[in-house]
Each structure stands twice: as C-alpha cells, then as structure tokens.
Image: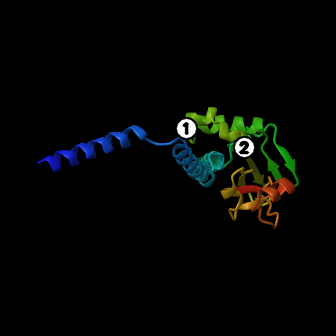
Amino acid sequence: MTIINKYMKTYFKNLRKNIKSGFTLIELLVVIGILGVLAAALVATIDPFEQLKKAQDTNTTNALVEWLNATTRYYTTHSAYPWDTVANGGANCHAGAVPTGDVSLLSTGAMNDCTTALIGDNELKQAFATSNNLKYIFITQEVANNQTVGCFNPSSKSILHNANTHYTVAGVDAGVLCDTTAHKDANPTSCYWCTR
C-alpha cells in the first residue's frame, strides 16, 4: 500500500507540474503562424473580389437575356419592337438611338424608355425599373436582318474566358477571344459578351 501511495503522490505531483507549465510563447506563435498561412491560402484560392465580379456579371447576363426575351414576346404580340413607332405597333422608345450603318444602338435614355414600355406591357417585372444591371447592357437592332443583339462588357475572369466574349458593343464578331484581363485592357472595344 505504501508503494501505491508513494506512486500516486509522485503521479499527482508531476501532473500538477505539467498543468502549470501550459504552452510556451514560441508554441503559440508557431500555431498562429500556421493558421495564418492556411487562411491566406484559402483567401487566395477563393478570391472574394473575383467572386463578386462573377456575381455581378451573372446578374447582368440574366438581366440581358430577360430583356431580350421580353422584346421577343413584345414583338410576338405587337408585330413590332418597342422602339418602333406607335404607327407601326411599337412604343416609340427609340428616341435617343444612335444609328451606325445598318445597326442602331439604343442609348441609355432609350433603354430606360423601352424598359418602361416593356414593364407597362407586362413583359418585364416592375423590379427592372430600378435595376442597376441595365446600365451595363447595350441593345443593338440590326436593321438588315431585323435581329436584336444584347451585349455587356464583363469584369470577371470566368466570363472573359467565355467563348461568347469576343464581340464589339454592336455585337459584331471581333475575331479574337477576350480571354485575359490584359487583352481586355488592350482591346476594350472587342471584349463584349453578346447574345441574340
């Protein structure tokens, strides 16, 4: 029994000594440094600013496609686009368009007027009236083939790598892919994502 008592006293004495010692400052700094390196690697992998740009581009793409679909529905019911004159069945929201050859680019004012006309005709939801994404969208009417083209200038790398990002603002194929930010900066007029 005395051997067990002696052993237990020694055990508890060593246990108290180990509990009091805790971690050294060096050990804590090493752990904090390792956690910092892991956090930096995670942030670099995720790139939150790129994710924000990608979200903005995705929202703009969705707004652009919905706007073009609304003009198609409007054309189906009125046999005219909203920018056509009232006499031809349109809403005459073309005021402020900039004609360039056989292409007519809607200005910002005309875009807002046409959006209001599409909302009034129940082709778009009321939320489009206050959408910030419309300011990034360019709508072009190709007069020769009566086709509407919608474009925007993307800011995220993923959309810059997209095969549809090689057009001018009027939807004309520029012939080169805008697959890097450096190319976009060097050739900003041929870095638009477009759809018809």
What colour-coding does the image apply?
rainbow
- At 37% from the left and 43% from the top, the residue drawn is 18
Give 47 or 101, whichever is nearer the viewer: 47
- At 69% from the left and 56% from the top, the residue drawn is 157
Q: Amino acid at mark 1?
A: Lys
Element under label 1? loop
Quarter holding the C terminus?
bottom right
- Say whether residue 53 is visible: yes
Q: Which mark is residue 125?
A: 1
Occupied quadrant, residue 63 = top right
Horizontally, residue 127 falls left or right of residue 80, namely left
Q: Position of residue 176 (x, y in %)?
A: 81, 66
Give 156 or 21, whichever is nearer the viewer: 21
Give the farthest residue toward the front: 2
- At 68% from the left and 62% from the top, the residue drawn is 162
Badge 2, how many Cα within 10 Å: few under 14, some, many 20+?
A: some
Q: Amino acid at mark 2?
A: Tyr
- At 79% from the left and 40% from the top, the residue drawn is 107
* Dot placed on the residue nearer the N-terminal end, 2 or 1: 1
Taking 110 as reference, is 157 above or below it?
A: below
Horizontally, residue 41 falls left or right of residue 171, namely left
Q: Position of residue 134 (x, y in %)?
A: 68, 40
Give 59 or 123, whichever is nearer the viewer: 59
Element under label 2? helix
Occupied quadrant, residue 175 = bottom right
Q: Label 2: which residue?
A: 136
Horizontally, residue 184 falls left or right of residue 15, namely right
Q: How many marks?
A: 2
- Say whether residue 86 is visible: no
Q: Position of residue 192 (x, y in %)?
A: 76, 55
Give the farthest residue toward the left: 1
Give the farthest residue toward the bottom: 175
